[in-house]
Image (cartoon, rainbow, N blue to C red):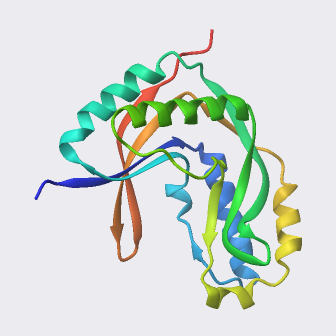
Amino acid sequence: MDEQWRLFAAIELPEPVRERIGQEIERLRRLGWQAKWVNPEGSHLTVKFYGSVPLQALPQLQEALRAGLSDLPAFSIETAGAGVFPHPSRPRVLWLGVGGEVEALARLQRRVEELSLELGFPLEERPYHPHLTLARFRPEDLPSLRGLERQLQRLATLPPIAIPVRALTLYRSELRRTGAVYSVVDTFALEASR
């Protein structure tokens, strides 16, 4: 059988953002919240999830992303807001939001989708909602989420932290018993700011 890698394209986060994620996870844990918490060191802003990709298709994907993204200008986004998916009465995912040059981020995401579609990767059907995942909740975790609305309001008012976007990174995700392990496959530079 041909080897396949689970791949996704994402924006790397600067250390201050990963530190914020770690601090907020610790704060919520101390409140007694139960969840499947993300590893702050592996945190990223997903742009496109590819799923299982045959290894022989990887060079073509790398070439398309390298050529297709080099004319998009670098930009800057920032942490802003917070929320849960799908709804506060049925929280499944807790996230920090993104502000700043979100139109530039949307252009990057659309370009990645277009380039990927040309190679036969399906389009993401859900609208793109950029976010930084903090936790995933199972039904049995929900009773522990005391003060959810208050905590969402507090998270939403944290001071923004800048996230410069100079490149898109292609990651490999390896699922292990201890959680997913991410490794960088390639990085695709955006056009440097003038």
Q: Quadrant of residue 76?
A: top right
Q: Which residue in the rendered view is the most extreme toward the left? A: 1
Residue pictured at 56% horizontal, 33% vertical: 110
> Viewer-proximal residue, 85 or 160?
85
Q: Seen in the image, is 178 located left or right of residue 74?
A: left
The x and y percentages for residue 59 are 24, 33
Q: Seen in the image, is 49 located left or right of residue 19?
A: left
Q: Seen in the image, is 108 located left or right of residue 8?
A: right
Task: In the rendered view, tell whether residue 4 sits above or below residue 55.
Answer: below
Q: Which residue in the rendered view is the most extreme toward the top? A: 194
Q: Quadrant of residue 51?
A: bottom left
Quadrant where the image shows the C terminus: top right
Residue pictured at 35% horizontal, 27% vertical: 64
Q: Quadrant of residue 135?
A: bottom right
The x and y percentages for residue 26 are 68, 72
Q: How many marks?
A: 0
Task: In the rendered view, tell whether residue 4 sits above or below residue 101.
Answer: below
The x and y percentages for residue 176 are 34, 71
Quadrant where the image shows the N terminus: bottom left
The x and y percentages for residue 115 are 43, 30
Q: Seen in the image, is 113 located left or right of residue 6?
A: right
Residue pictured at 55% horizontal, 55% vertical: 43
> Viewer-proximal residue, 113 or 99?
113
Task: In the rendered view, tell whether residue 141 sits above or below residue 91.
Answer: below
> Viewer-proximal residue, 55 or 180?
55
